Amino acid sequence: MDPSTIDQELDPANFNPEIGGVVTENQIFDSTETTVYNWHYEESNPKLRQLYERGKASQWNAALDLDWDTDVDLESELFISDPAIEGEDWYKKLTKGEQRRLLVEANTQTLSQFLHGEQGALIATAQLVSAVPDMDAKFYASTQVADEARHVEVFGRYVREKTHGGYHITESLFSLLKSITEESRWDFKFLGMQLLVEGLALAAFINMSNRTKEPLLKKILRLVMQDEARHVAYGVLSLNDFYIDMSEKDRLERQEFVYQSTIHMRDRLFSTEAHERVGIERAVIQDFMHRSEHVRNFRNLMFINVVPNMKKIGLLSGFLEEKFSEMGILDLQDFDSEGLLQSYIEGENSLAADRAKAEG
Ligand SMILES: [Fe+2]
Ligand SMILES: [Fe+2]
């Protein structure tokens, strides 16, 4: 994969996935993944088979298991204010009403990216069914396809029914989804989707779950996180050992892809569109994002899953180790991301303690 493709500019003329907006042409990508038939039907990977069984047993129904009649008051209960911006002069100048609206807009923007990312996961996982060589890996990917469809369903419905309207996909997420979709090698799809996009999404779900009091959204996030924990495990299990015997040149190509994607997502993860909708100039918000320690810490926390997982699959050495160290995220390599996630899935009693630990 050529990392420079991640930086290509979007042509807005080709592209308008705005929810509830004007219906335009569907986005068409040329994907070239290899399709593999496997004639060995016996169990080949017990751990993957076990995960497949868990996947089947853990299906939930988005239409029946969630109370869609919940009356959501965006202004008063959806989002807790953001400590990162409260000290800013431009923020203090806003009226209380404008501050509430900014929070709602910023979080709607994030929810919209969850939705677009979930569609990326749906498509990438469908490609994996055909591209992965192992039959147990195909089985598992098939349950994930159903999971991702459900995620698109819930976030789509929430944004449509409970917010004032969704946002376009950000340029950085779009470029990453495009490069994953068009990539022919299955392990790059795993790296890009299961470990990078899903890893970042999980961190963002945890953050949003901490910041909302709204019961319907909290339940959606918990159910989705439960599925995503399996998906990340699938990525780690599938790539475990895959890179051990790989040539240095091929390993480096993977490490460069991870690094470029990480930098790209870190620097462009936060869009200014929500702030612009409430009248704050782009330069003002960009300046804030550039110098704020809160934003920097938060950005690094987005990698609490990515860094330990790179270590688990054996890519965190040499080039990547050096680059993660430069970025200041290498210390996250032994972070217990699975434990943190489990505490969110199982209950909320230890949220505050875990958050303090994560920030610690
Ligand atoms: Fe998902
Ligand atoms: Fe997923």
Image: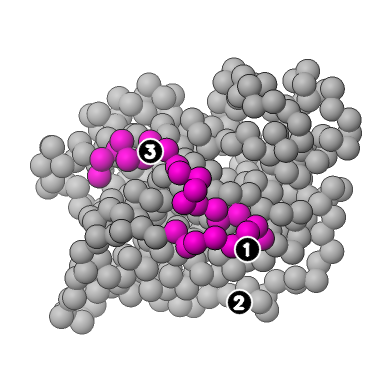
**Residue depicted at 49% across the width and 48% down the height:** 13
Sequence order check, earlier mark of 1 and 2: 2
Q: Position of residue 237 (x, y in %)?
A: 31, 58
Q: Is residue 137 left or right of residue 357?
A: left
Q: CA distance from mark 3 to mark 1?
A: 27 Å
**Residue depicted at 84% across the width and 47% down the height:** 75
Looking at the rendering, the stretch of residues picked out in magenta corresponds to 1-27
Q: Is residue 213 visible to us here?
A: no
Q: Considering depth in this image, is 87 or 113 the residue closer to the camera?
A: 113
Q: Is residue 258 left or right of residue 332?
A: left
Circle number at residue 156: 1
Question: Magenta includes 3?
Answer: yes
The residue wearing badge 3 is: 8
Q: Is mark 3 within 8 Å of ligand 2?
A: no
Q: Quadrant of the C terminus?
A: top right
For marks 1 and 2, give the one nearer the viewer. 1
Q: CA distance from mark 3 to mark 2?
A: 38 Å
Identify the amino acid type marked 1: Gly
**Residue depicted at 37% across the width and 28% down the height:** 324
- Badge 2 density bin: few <14, some 14–19, many ≥20, Cα 10 Å: few
Q: Quadrant of the N terminus?
A: top left
The residue wearing badge 2 is: 61
Circle number at residue 42: none
Q: Position of residue 351 (x, y in %)?
A: 66, 46
Q: Position of residue 238 (x, y in %)?
A: 28, 59
